[in-house]
Image (cartoon, grey):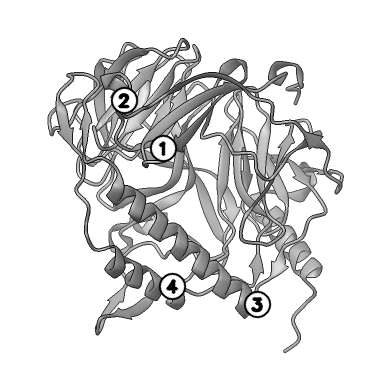
Amino acid sequence: MTKPHPALTSLIALAACLTTAGTAAAQEIIRLPGEDRPLEADFEEVYRVGALDGPVWQQFGTIIDVAFDGAGNAYLLDIDAVTVLVVGRDGDLARTIGQPGNGPGEFDFPRHLAVMEDGRLVVADVPRHRAMQMYSSDGTFDRSVRVADDLLSIRGRMYADRGGREGVIVSGGLNRIEAMRPADDRDQPGVRPIRRLALDGDTVVLEGMTQAWAPPSAGVVTFRVGGHEIGTEGQSPPPRTFDPGLFVGTLPGGGIAFSDSSAYAIRLAREDGSVFRILTRPLHPTPVTGRILEAEIERQIEEYVAASAAAQNRPRTIMNGRTGEVVQALPPTGMIEGLTRTRRAFLEALPAADEVPVVLDLSTTWDGEIWVRRRGEDLLSDGPIDVLTRDGRYLGSYAADAAMPSAFGPDGLVAFIETGELGEYMVVVKRVAGARSRGTQG
């Protein structure tokens, strides 16, 4: 069977996405230039926190998430100390929120956080506490909002709803127990919902904000390790290798920007979910070959081994920033080789998509700029970061060696989660030069 030309495949996928996201007649398609316009990543460092020999509160365990409030305070989620540290604009500790435990306002297995503009905090403590933990802007515990029994975890990140409602937007998806999902909440072939989690009641309500395009399902993945057969049945199917991610960023006023396909097509939706603008560049996905797939599997294995080794080599004790007491971090597993064999068996059994997608990541700034990380020329590494505006302008691209910020804040603030030579975690806060003068129309 003759396969269609990659450019034609991309056009077909783009057309399918337009149909999924809404009526094409209501959408403005803006074709941006194909040639890159260089931007200088001259970010001014404001402060950095995290050091093995620093103040007690800076002796972090594992910083897994960071976000800003409207005053420019940074919120750091440390999953080893099981607490959130709030760092002021001056780089000093303002307060800590939460502590390990099973009582009200305590954390058991926190993995995501979102911060409202006024400083209210939402922490996803799903696997064991089965709740979204909510805190007031002064750091005091407000209430827990229970999640449904079918929810296992959040794939990706979550961001505060910027439309003034009490809720969060999920970038990525939800990992769920399929047999426990309500009959009226099953994913339909070819579409995947962009979810808003409403938090204004006693239980989390999953709201479908809009429909994104979905690649074919990987189905149940079965593989063998050490003579034992392992399968993924019973939970949401994993994405295939090279499946395009569902990347969502929030915009001022409650809208979103998202990427869902292999092509370069950034969709902008209003608060009601209607897509009104699509930003494209003439950059096309590459067909997947056996050599490309093999190289990608090896890249993922190397990344997995490096992350496991770093976790094993990090100091095992850390300090709780709230109480000053020593907290024992998660012990090393001593099973890196076995885990690596399992990971390789899974990746080799996992189906692959037909194309290598163009977009690797997407984030939005406090003022509504859209930062799009593209894939590198070798298809396995990071490429440039494009900076777009809501009204359809291409401002330029940062070079491939520029890091994508882990969080964006007001007045051009950005935060990066980094690790040092000994695997210690640190957070570096910088300011993007000229961010406020680049224009935020639309």
Name the front one of labels 1 and 4. 4
Residue appearing at x 57%, y 60% in the figure: 214
Q: Separation of disc 1 and disc 2 at Cα?
A: 40 Å
Label at residue 53: 2
Q: Separation of disc 3 and disc 2 at Cα?
A: 48 Å
The location of residue 420, given as percent across then percent down, is 42, 37
Number of marks in the image?
4
Q: Separation of disc 1 and disc 4 at Cα?
A: 26 Å
Name the residue carrying label 3.
289
Q: Separation of disc 2 and disc 4 at Cα?
A: 48 Å
Residue in front for this viewpoint, 319 or 435? 319
Of the 4 image quadrants, the one containing the N terminus is bottom right
Residue type at tag 1: Leu
Mark 1 or mark 3: whose residue is earlier in sequence: 1
Mark 1 or mark 2: whose residue is earlier in sequence: 2
Q: Is residue 436 above or below residue 290?
A: above
Name the residue carrying label 1.
197
The location of residue 338, given as percent across then percent down, is 27, 69
Residue in front for this viewpoint, 292 or 131? 292
Q: Is residue 48 above or below residue 91?
A: below
Label at residue 219: 4
Mark 3 or mark 2: whose residue is earlier in sequence: 2
Q: Is residue 176 above or below residue 290?
A: above
Name the front one of labels 1 and 3. 3
Name the front one of labels 4 and 3. 3
Q: Separation of disc 4 and disc 3 at Cα?
A: 21 Å
Residue appearing at x 72%, y 67% in the figure: 286
SS label for mark 2:
loop
The location of residue 66, given as percent across then percent down, is 43, 30
The location of residue 145, given as percent across then percent down, is 27, 32
Name the front one of labels 3 and 2. 2
